[in-house]
Image: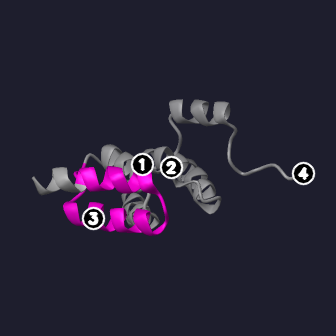
Amino acid sequence: MARSKIPNPLERRHLLERDLPAAQALALAESYLELERPLEAVAFLVLAEADEKLAELVELAVEAGDAFLLKSLADVRRVQVDADAWSRLAAAAEAAGKETYEALARRQFQRAEE
């Protein structure tokens, strides 16, 4: 069986606690993204200071209706998500049958509108 390019959970934690070179952190993030595991890629993108990639993930989260990923990205980027993004995410979550994410996105939309 071929070994995965991503670390196991314990190795991942140890890597995140070390001072990784940006190139290595970016390579690990790309490995997670290739396996469609964007949430796990976020911490490595932050270490790599890959702001452009983080911004791309914001749009991916909106299109996928993934409120948890969007909230995580907003937290690490220290930005507020605007009402339009929450509205679009709620619609995508509804279309995908992600009721919990839809409800969360609608609550966040209302807060952003206030």
Q: Are marks 1 and 2 in contact (CB under 8 Å)?
A: yes
Describe residue 10's horizontal placement relative to residue 105 as left or right: right
Residue type indicated by callout 3: Ser
**N-terminal label among 4 and 3:** 4
Report helix, strand or loop for mark 4.
Answer: loop
Q: CA distance from mark 2 to mark 4?
A: 25 Å
Q: CA distance from mark 4 to mark 3?
A: 43 Å
Of the residues tagged 1 and 4, which is closer to the observer?
Answer: 1
User: Badge 3 is on which residue?
Assistant: 87
User: Badge 2 is on which residue?
Assistant: 39
Q: CA distance from mark 1 to mark 4?
A: 32 Å
Q: Return the x and y of residue 88 as percentages of the image width and height.
A: 32, 68
Q: Residue placed farthest to the left in the image?
A: 114
**Front residue of this view, candidates 37 and 49:** 37
| Label 3 crowd (10 A; few <14 / some 14-19 / many >=20) | many
User: Badge 1 is on which residue?
Assistant: 68
Report helix, strand or loop for mark 3.
Answer: helix
The magenta-colored residue range is 79-108
Of the residues tagged 3 and 2, which is closer to the observer?
Answer: 3
Which disc is residue 1 wearing?
Answer: 4
**N-terminal label among 1 and 2:** 2
**Front residue of this view, candidates 73 and 71:** 71
- The residue that appears at 22% across and 56% down in the rendered structure is 109
**N-terminal label among 3 and 2:** 2
> Magenta stretch containing residue 107, yes or no?
yes
Q: CA distance from mark 1 to mark 2?
A: 9 Å
